[in-house]
Amino acid sequence: MAQVNSPARPRKDRQFKIKEGADVFSPKDLIQLPRPGVAIVNPGEEDLVLIPVSQYSFETKKTNKTIYIAPLGSTVSPVEFPIITGGEVFFLDARTVAHVVGEAIYAVSLEYDGTLVQAPLPPYLVGSFPSGSSPTNFKFTGSKKAHTQAKDDVQHILVFSAKVYADYNLTAVKEQDEAWANRETSGKVYDGLYVRHWDEYSTDKKSRLFSVELSKRNGKWVLGTDFFKPLEGTEHYTPVEPFGGAEDYDVSGTQIVYTAKDPSVDEASHTRQNVYIAPLKGGVTPRALTTGHQGATHSPIFNPQGTVVIWTEMAKDGYESDRARLVVYDLETSARWYITEDWDRSVSEVVFAQDGKSLFVTASEHGHVKVFHLTIEFEDLKAAGHKPHPHKQPFALTEQHSSHGIYPLAGGKFVFTQSSLTGPNNVYLAELVPFDRSEVGNHGHIKTTQITKFGEKELKSYKLDEGEAFWFDGAHGKKVQGWSHKPRGYDAEAGSTKKWPTVFLIHGGPQGAWEDGWSTRWNPNVFAQQGYWVILINPTGSTGFGQDFVDAITEDWGGKPFVDLRKGWEYALKHYPIDSHRTVAAGASWGGFAINWIQGHPEYDFGFKALFCHDGIFDTRYGGYATDELFFWDHDFGGKPWDKHAGKIAEKFNPSEFVHKWSTPQLIVHGGKDYRLAETEGLSAFNALQQRGVPSRLVLFPDENHWVLKPANSLKWHYEVLRWFDEWVGEE
């Protein structure tokens, strides 16, 4: 067996410690930083926002959960209300917060006089859900009349999801769970797909929607005891696993609209999700609003009047990264319109303004997730019928950072949550500033007020780098974007000629992007704070640069993206003070494929002294059989693994075919519960490196999935990655 002449292993007695201190933002600081969620506005008054926050402590080894309630339009500081037992929270009315703990729901009454927010009374029990049901993803209708065929209509309905077995019986879940846990055999039998999905083996227990009456009696909220099954008689499961949440459905005063996988097709081979509508209490078979020929759908919502539904829709079944267009559906006439056909962006979130005449949407654009505004001319849509008609372009209201969680208010105002490369989520109040929309350009203007300042105190002394976007000519002359992060200690005005060790990060997806938003994994500032210059490239296949750019990676994994990566690296070497003799590259998922691909292509001449592959692909063709979501491989390689055409593409871009060229020291990390890319991918790469005599190290996390999420494991991940970098390009 031929072996390579590998670089000598650094001395074994080298001691490594992660840099920490009052002026160093370390991995431990990242993990312990508060993690705010999305703001929820109180209905009616719209003068308070509720923000759930979690924070891990290495001292107590516990995650503390709390909620902050912040006034809108005043200078009063947010008030903290600890929720030691965890759970979910939402508003019942302008001055009452619901807190669900396990299977019990409590009400917390608030008082706010414009200067002080307080909860003077202890919480009281509103009611209970069946034992073992674990309800989640709550939505409350408010005081509108609920439609049902029964005579016991009530004014308030709470809708939620819970995982139940095939009998759709919420009250039997606990007993069925116990029977499953105490079964005498561990064998699982499958006659169809999925066998396993993301990080769990599939069972008969799946997510379904339920509804229950929730009314106010004698000044107190009371939960009903009858739980209705609006999806009964169907094989509709929502929210859609593994990542679906409350955004997968919406409620009006009478109905539920939701997205669910099409039960007529194999869900592992298809992305098709239909949008359905049903009465709040069921009793009527849900009606499909989609054509049944589309791909995935997301975020269905009602207009404030409950007469129109909008959702995002991808045209191609089997392609999870197709452009998400906005669909408008008139419930009164069953007319359907696609209103963003001329806009080359993929919509992420969508909400109606309170007047129902315009929309706020979010979409990725050039490394930022922006808020856009779009007016809907319903009369023009109805006049055009199903004929082609011109569409107005959404105009950007924000330009920087990453925004989400839009909540519309009266008078054209809205609340949104925003993070950046230098800080976690914070809440902002925005007001549209009038301007002439007939003028050239599609950018609006808003006046914003920052409501919360999460992380500001903790991050004040660290001087995190905001990141610098740069552009260069990539494959076929296309403009490609990258990000540069300066290391801690760099001073541009000092005139230093110092060259810096550098980390080159490659994102996964491959249809993803490095964006101006906070991340608790692969945070570029964590590497920069350890003394590395950090370069990130958004190559062909990245999102936010037009659909053609996204589509161009299809059947070309090892082609145009690597032209972009090479040209981006050349640009960085030319324009930044990088020590070309002390560089490393790292990537996860598709980025891990990229690391293994670079390993087998020394002719690219990157010059990296070490590599790091996290949950990456070693054998592309094998991945087409072993992954959970088969539609992904089928699309990106143009067919099934055994098809002649797809087989040739997989062989052409298969890292395992180039192992005879592997010679660069490499770290491999893989999760044992990663069913997207099985751990055998990491084991295979490590076996190959070891047999070739290439310095290599394998770190396995048996209890983690595609991501390393547990706090202690995350710290271990950072330690091993930074230790590996230090061994090969650290200071002497």
Image: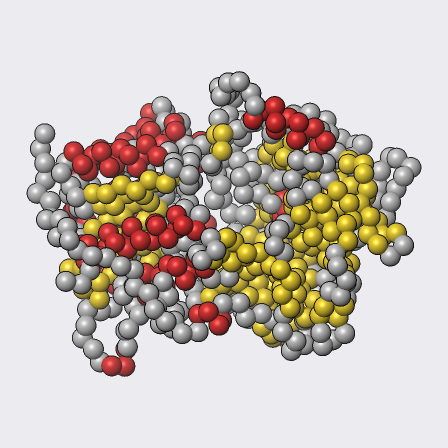
Q: Position of residue 313 (x, y in %)?
A: 58, 44
Left or right: where 669 falls relative to 107: left
Left or right: where 686 falls relative to 105: left
Identify which residue is drawn at 72% across, 62% down.
Answer: 42
Identify which residue is drawn at 24% across, 49% down.
Answer: 611
Identify which residue is drawn at 58% across, 43% down.
Answer: 244
State the quadrant of the N terminus. top left
Outermost residue to the front: 60
Could one spot residue 654 in this view of the protein? no
* 164 versus 32 height, above or below: above
Give whichever of 713, 476 is nearer the camera.
Answer: 713
Q: Position of residue 144 (x, y in %)?
A: 83, 51
The answer to which image quadrant residue 598 occupies is top left
* 18 versus 559 height, above or below: below
* 401 versus 214 height, above or below: below
Give whichever of 598, 128 is nearer the camera.
Answer: 128
Left or right: where 459 falls relative to 297: left
Left or right: where 529 falls relative to 399: left
* Figure label count: 0
Identify which residue is drawn at 18% across, 46% down.
Answer: 665
State the quadrant of the C terminus. bottom left
Give whichever of 203, 282 is nearer the camera.
Answer: 203
The answer to which image quadrant residue 670 occupies is top left
